[in-house]
Image: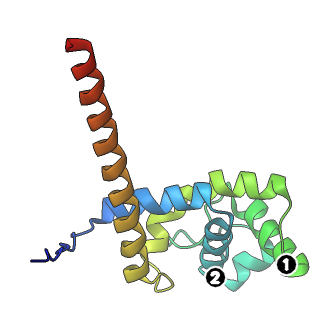
Amino acid sequence: MSEEKTTKKRKISKKARIKWLKYAISTKRGCAIRALLYIYENQTEDEKNTRTTKEHNCMGFNSFDADMLTGYVRYYQTYNSLTENQVKTLMQCMQKYAEQLLNTNKLDLERVDAYIERRMAEEEAKAKLAAEGQDHVQEEQVQ
C-alpha cells in the first residue's frame, strides 16, 4: 500500500514575505536588479529626471538613495549590467524596499510564496538533520 504524501499549503504572512524578499535581494544579483528597476518605475518623471525625491508618497527611492540608485538604473539601461561594486551596494541597499515591492503589482506573489515554501522546507530539513545528528552524538556519548 503506497503512502500518499500530502502537502499543506502554508499561509505566508506579509512579515515572512518581506523577510524572504530581503534575503533574495541580498543574495541573488538578478533579484536585486529587478527590485531596483521596479522601485525606479515608482519614481515620478520629475524625480527620475532630477535624481531626487520630491514627493513623499511612500513610492520610489528615499531621498538618501535617489541619486545613487537612479544612476545605477541609468548605467544598467546603458550597459545592460552593473559593476561588481554596484551590485554589492545594491544588494545591501535594496533590502529596505522589500515592503514597497510587495505593494507593487510587479511581483508574482504565487512565485514569491513558492520560493518561500522551498526555503522554509530546506530550513526545516536542515534543522531535522541537525537534530538527528545531535541525537546520534548523544547516543554515542551514552555508550
Question: Label 1: how many residues lie within 10 Å, few (<14), some (14-19) or many (20+)?
Answer: few
In the rendered view, would you say 88 is above or below 55? above
Q: Report the quarter where the N terminus lies.
A: bottom left
Q: Which residue is mark 2?
A: 41
**Measuring 77% from the left and 73% from the top, which residue is drawn there?**
73
Q: Quadrant of residue 18?
A: bottom left
**Residue type at tag 1:** Asn
In the image, residue 84 lies at what x, y percent? 83, 56
Q: Residue at x 90, y 77 (%)?
A: 79
Identity of the amino acid at label 2?
Answer: Glu
Asked whether, in this view, residue 60 is left or right of residue 117, the answer is right
Mark carried by residue 80: 1
Outermost residue, left side: 1
Residue 49 position by quadrant = bottom right
**Quarter of image, res 46:** bottom right
Q: Quadrant of the C terminus?
A: top left
State the mark number for residue 65: none
Q: Are marks 2 and 1 in contact (CB under 8 Å)?
A: no
- Residue sitting at x 72%, y 67%: 52
User: Residue 127 in the image: x percent, y percent?
Assistant: 32, 43
- From the viewer's side, name the closer residue of 103 and 60: 103
Nearest the viewer among 90 and 59 is 90
User: For the point 83% across and 80% down, which residue is it?
Assistant: 77
